[in-house]
Image (tube, rainbow, N blue to C red):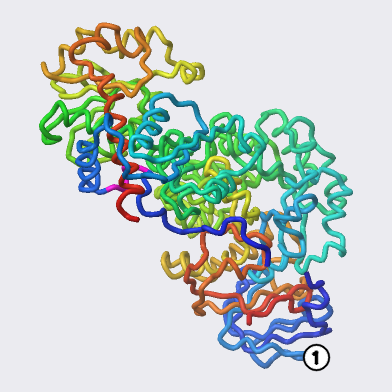
Amino acid sequence: MMQRLRPYAMNKPARGSLLGIEHLEAKEILGLLKLARRMNPLKVRTLLRNRRIVLLFYEASTRTRSSFEIAAKTLGAITTLVQSSGSSIEKGESLLDTGSTLRAVGADAIVIRHPCAGAPHLLAKHLDIPVINAGDGMHEHPSQALLDAFTILKHKKSFKGLQVAIIGDIYHSRVARSACHLLAKFGVKITLCGPPEFVPEVAATLVPGLRVSRHPEEAVRGVDVIMLLRLQKERLAGQKIRLQDYVAHYQLTPSRLKLAKRDAIVMHPGPIIRGLELTAEVADGAQSVILDEVHNGVPTRMAILARALGKAK
Amino acid sequence: MPSAKSQSREAASLLIKGGHVIDPAAKINTLMDVLLRDGRVAEVALPNKVRGGADEKFDARGLIVAPGFIDLHVHLREPGQGYKETIASGTAAAAAGGFTSVCTMPNTAPVVDTAEWVAWLRHPERAGVVNVLPIAAATRNSRGATLTDFAALQRAGAVAVTDDGKPILDDEIMRTALLLGAELNLPVVQHAEDTRLTEHCSMHEGPTSFRLGLRGMPAAAEATVVDRDVTLAQQIRESRLHVAHLSTSDALKAVRRGKRARARVTCEVTPHHFTLLDQDVGEYNTNFKMNPPLRSASDREAILVALADGTVDAIATDHAPHATHEKEVEFERAAFGITGLETALALAITKLQREHKIPLARIVELFTAGPARVFDLRGRGSLARGNFADVTIFDPKKRWTFEAAKSRSLSHNTPFDGWQFTGKVVATIVGGRIVHRAD
């Protein structure tokens, strides 16, 4: 018999893995958010001292990567970044072989971002260490959904009775999918808004209590939270909708924002493009919590890493 | 691999006694004895009424004796991709699944687009244990641009032409292919997929693909091509169109339209499409990734109706073996296709007969007379006297568990590992020789 190159093969993801929001229970989410509130990004701790966390990034990232790295280091862990360019990935190494290699090097957990949906799931199925999804294709971005929930709960007492409008390119958005899964678990009413190319009718089947609207005025009326998504210009190339039409019809302007509740907050996972999905006034306005979200990324990701490595062992 | 000879036992004559013969083409569905002699069917008679003697006897009491099963759609991967499957290993899997004839797809490396490669596939050195009936490429290198030499391919033994794996999209090329096929009485097999609608897609478009964040192939990508092809087939006298691995309700409507208009339009359906749904993909299980993809519940329902009412002509496996390293990758990057030869009959009995109450005789027809008619395979698909001595003997009540690891195929990319089935092949006889016998 040949020696197996992947001696760590598992069938179930290791305890502490975070692959998506869809299969988390509401109480696990509340537990993570509670843990995040206890995390102090300004104080370096020793909870994860000498634990090795690999950040395996197959896609560009500023916010997610830096905040995972800062979160890990704040907890005392050692981090190393592996990117597709400048590594064996460029030479054609498969995802599983890369994962096994990192495991053999001594990784205690892998944070992975990948352009293919389900890539973290594949890795988790074959490794005995926690795998954390930092964004997989168009599928999920669970740490973003958690930090958004963290942000919402800083501004709203609870999820109870909340109404949320999500405007933009839902189809290509892993942020939108994770947000919908999370909010729906707490009974939040969600309206998805955008042109059919970005918000196909099938989107309404994602979670219970979801509806689709083509009119932002209708979508934002009376809501507590407006979440905007980045419009990816490169995606527009093949689509029928033109940029000017999108701006005219769907851009969040001060007048559209007025239709929401007076204390509504405006969220955006970033990077924002001023003048496209929102105006500069809205981005910089009093209701915008966009930078707050980025800020909350660190304690949220500290909680995710602490859950992955801190308690179980 | 053991050679064909060492697996089989030579006998000039073989009497299959006491079995229940189902031969839909001959309208037989009763207890009969079958005598095979010198590679042909010598006699089918009421129990103990066979006149000639036999060198060897096969006790078929309690078993179904059927004409040898024919699979219109398999990928045996040779020439060029022997790491996935060889003709020897693929035909061993076919024999284990009860198939005595398999029609091989030409999307190999190189593509089977010349008479020489057709002859190569049929050469005894390939060590096939069942009949290998090559389907040749319809266009050179299956690029969809220049038609191949249909007449030469047919003379070399090709039973049909196709660019399977890819569609013939160009209207003029498809029309000319049907015209040439009409002159030669050669079926044109279409892999119906408008690839302009399916770029970068890895599963069926619907709630599951949306939830998983995977680009979905719309059902319309199949139906529009079938619709056009049926229209062309209706316009070209004597042309023969066969729709491969049909998977959608709308494509079935187009096939029905052609059949009502008496065009020579036929279609096949795979066991996985009548068994599974798109949602069975689960958490990115690549053993549920194939093309055409698993479809919606309403598509499957339409397929079940069409299997029962006669619209579907044949069950074909689309046996598509792939190595582990081609499947244990990101879902979007995984190869399309699953193996199917060893599970086809079991799925048909477990799902079609037991769950959906389709009569066993109809199921046997879909494996025998149906496919024989589609490609006009003379001497096959029935146990008429003088036909090839190809026989499939199975136990329709036997319960068993399929284990992918024990498959005869070189590849184990099946979604049915560990499934419990009813109905198992007991013996497979090709040209009068037993090439497979259940343990």
Determine if residue B362 is in view. Answer: yes
Question: What is the quadrant of the C terminus of chain A in the image?
Answer: bottom left
Q: Which amino acid type is marked by label 1? A: Asp
Residue B304: where, in percent of width, then height?
A: 46, 56
Determine if residue B216 is in view. Answer: no
Q: Which residue is mark 1?
A: B55
Identity of the residue drawn at 82% across and 38% down: B148
Say above or below: A125 vs B163: below
Question: What is the quadrant of the N terminus of chain A in the image?
Answer: bottom right
- Asked whether, in this view, residue B235 is left or right of residue B421, the answer is right
Say above or below: A163 vs B296: above
Identity of the residue drawn at 60% across and 40% down: B192
Magenta-drawn segment:
A20-24
- Asked whether, in this view, residue B343 is left or right of residue B204, the answer is right
Residue B68: where, in percent of width, then height?
A: 68, 70
Residue A38: where, in percent of width, then height?
A: 20, 38
Identity of the residue drawn at 46% across and 16% down: A233
Is residue A22 found inside the magenta-colored segment of the image? yes
Q: Quadrant of residue A265?
A: top left
Identity of the residue drawn at 62% across and 79% down: B426
